[in-house]
Image (cartoon, helix red, strand yellow):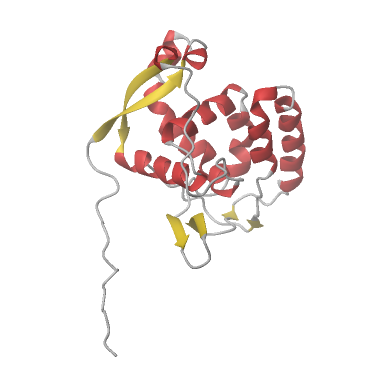
C-alpha cells in the first residue's frame, strides 16, 4: 500500500500593526445616519477603535449574533438609496481584530458596526466599561478565529479562542459581580422596551463574566 503525503501547514503571516492606515467602506442605514449630528459624523472614523476597547471582551464572551455557522449574516438592505456609504481610515490592527470578532459571530463587519452603533445609542457601552476594563487589560493577549468543517459528521462550527480564555486578574478587590448583575437587569429593562432589539437583549443577558480578584498592575493593550 502506498501513501499520499500532503503538507497542510502552510499559512499566511504578516505584520499586524502597520505604519499606515487603511481606507475602508462602511454601509450605514439612513435611519441610523440621520440620528448623528454633523459633529458626530466627523467622529465616525474613530468609532471602530473605541468599539474594540469598549465591547471587545463583551463580544468575545457573548452569544453569537449569527445562527448559521456556514453563512455570514449581512444587514438587511432597504435599498441603495437608503444606505449611506462611509469611507473611513482605520489602523490595520483595529480592522483585523474587528473582522475577527465579526467572523466569530457569523456576521459582516458592517453588520457588527451597526449593531454596536445601536448599543452605543442606548449607552450600553457606558454601563459596561468599568465592569469590563477597570483594573484589567483592555484586550486579550491573542485571538484565534477557527472555522471548523467536519465532513464526516456533517457539521460546521465557528470558534473564537482567546488568551487568557476565561478570566483576568483584576486590580480592584471589591466584589463587582453583584454590581454587574444589578446593571444587567437595569439595561435589559431598557432594551425590553425596544421591540426591534430583541437580539441585543439575548446577547447581553448571555454574557458570562468570570473574574478572579488579585492585586496586580493594569497592563492595557493597545491598537
User: Which residue is painted at 59% across and 49% down in the image?
Assistant: 61
Count numbered badges in the picture. 0
Q: Residue at x 41, y 20 (%)?
A: 43
* Residue 99 rendering spot, x and y as whole percentages: 40, 42
Q: Quadrant of residue 142?
A: bottom left
Residue 221 placement (x, y as % from top left): 43, 47
Picture quadrant where residue 19 is located: top left
- Visible residue check, residue 212: yes
Q: Position of residue 157 (x, y in %)?
A: 51, 56
* Residue located at (49% from left, 45% from top): 138
Image location (x, y in percent) of residue 170: 60, 53
Residue 182 image-quadrant placement: top right
Please report the residue visible at 46 percent of the width from the left and 60 percent of the height from the top.
148
Left or right: 60 as drawn, with respect to 90: right
- 56 or 221: nearer the viewer: 56
- With 177 as the anchor, is 103 left or right in this view? left
Amino acid at each position: 500500500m502506498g501513501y499520499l503525503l500532503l503538507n497542510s501547514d502552510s499559512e499566511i503571516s504578516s505584520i499586524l500593526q502597520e505604519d499606515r492606515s487603511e481606507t475602508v467602506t462602511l454601509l450605514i442605514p439612513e435611519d441610523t445616519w440621520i440620528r448623528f449630528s454633523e459633529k458626530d459624523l466627523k467622529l465616525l472614523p474613530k468609532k471602530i477603535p473605541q468599539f474594540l476597547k469598549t465591547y471587545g471582551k463583551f463580544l468575545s464572551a457573548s452569544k453569537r449574533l449569527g445562527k448559521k455557522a456556514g453563512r455570514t449574516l449581512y444587514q438587511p438592505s432597504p435599498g441603495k438609496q437608503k444606505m449611506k456609504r462611509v469611507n473611513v481610515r482605520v489602523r490595520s490592527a483595529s480592522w483585523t481584530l474587528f473582522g475577527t470578532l465579526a467572523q466569530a459571530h457569523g456576521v459582516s463587519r458592517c453588520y457588527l458596526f451597526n449593531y454596536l452603533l445601536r448599543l452605543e445609542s442606548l449607552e450600553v457601552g457606558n454601563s459596561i466599561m468599568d465592569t469590563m476594563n477597570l483594573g484589567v487589560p483592555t484586550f486579550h493577549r491573542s485571538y484565534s478565529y477557527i472555522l471548523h468543517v467536519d465532513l464526516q459528521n456533517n457539521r460546521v462550527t465557528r470558534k473564537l479562542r482567546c488568551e487568557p480564555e476565561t478570566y483576568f486578574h483584576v486590580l480592584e478587590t471589591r466584589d463587582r459581580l453583584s454590581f454587574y448583575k444589578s446593571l444587567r437587569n437595569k439595561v435589559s429593562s431598557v432594551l425590553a422596551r425596544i421591540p426591534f432589539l430583541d437580539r441585543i437583549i439575548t446577547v447581553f443577558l448571555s454574557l458570562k463574566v468570570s473574574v478572579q480578584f488579585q492585586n496586580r498592575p493594569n497592563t492595557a493593550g493597545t491598537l
